Image (spheres, rainbow, N blue to C red):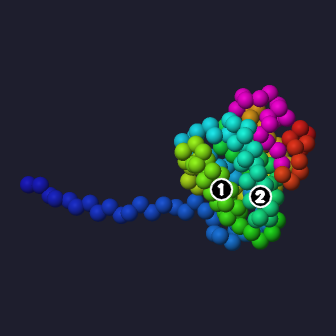
Amino acid sequence: RYVRCVVVQRPFKRKPNRLSAPVYEQRYVCSLTLVTAGRISAFASADWVAHCLDVLRGSAVEHRIAVLAYCFMPDHVHLLVHNTGTASVVRFVKDFKQFTGYRYKRTAGATLWQKSYHDHFLRNHEDVMSVAKYIFANPVRAGIVGTAAEYPFSGSLAWGRAVVEA
């Protein structure tokens, strides 16, 4: 005799990867990591990084987001941003990824960005400048350059390039 079992599978319920919307509209400093689709080395090209920086500047102004630090690694981007108004960090990232992704798709014929991104809101005990220096040191840790100052694809839209060399 065999007993017939029926297994009822419940649909997988994914845990939300975002905090509640009001959090992203508060005046916090947030560290973001945006990764390219398939880890393609899209940011190895100085021309492409320059275009993305132009889009980043425009998005920052439009959304009143101060970009305290950025680092375009070959296959991902680190950003340290401060929401200076009542804009949404989510909308800022969405616009940046949408504008750059559209242009990349038209020129390279491929998808630029992985879905979603990683965010971390700095706690009171975390020093903003220490996090910025950690971001600037990414190319050094990856073995791309000897010092952060040598890497041309990092800087700050708020404080200027000199902060990388400090």
Secondary structure mostly taken by the magenta-highlighted segment of the chain: loop
Give the residue type at disc 1.
Phe
Q: Measured from the top left, where is residue 69 in percent x and y?
A: 80, 49
Residue holding disc 1:
99
Q: Quadrant of the C terminus?
A: top right
Return the residue found at the far left.
1
Contact, mark 2 vs mark 1 (Cβ under 8 Å): yes
User: Left or right: 7 with respect to 79?
Assistant: left
Q: State the residue at coordinates (86%, 54%).
A: 158
Q: Residues within 10 Å of mark 2 (few under 14, many from 20)?
A: some
Task: Tell me the magenta residue range.
Answer: 142-156
Q: Is residue 154 visible?
A: yes
Q: State the residue at coordinates (80%, 62%).
A: 61
**Mark 2 residue element:** helix
Q: Quadrant of residue 48 in the image?
A: top right
Earlier residue among tags 2 and 1: 2
Q: CA distance from mark 2 to mark 1?
A: 10 Å
Q: Measured from the top left, where is residue 81 in percent x and y?
A: 77, 56
Q: Quadrant of residue 3 in the image?
A: bottom left
Q: State the residue at coordinates (80%, 69%).
A: 85
Residue holding disc 2:
58
**Mark 1 residue element:** helix
Q: Is residue 31 visible?
A: no
Q: Measured from the top left, where is residue 130 in percent x and y?
A: 83, 46
Is 66 or 100 nearer to us in this picture? 100
Q: Is the residue 9 above or below the residue 37 in the image?
A: below
Rendered image: mark on residue 52: none
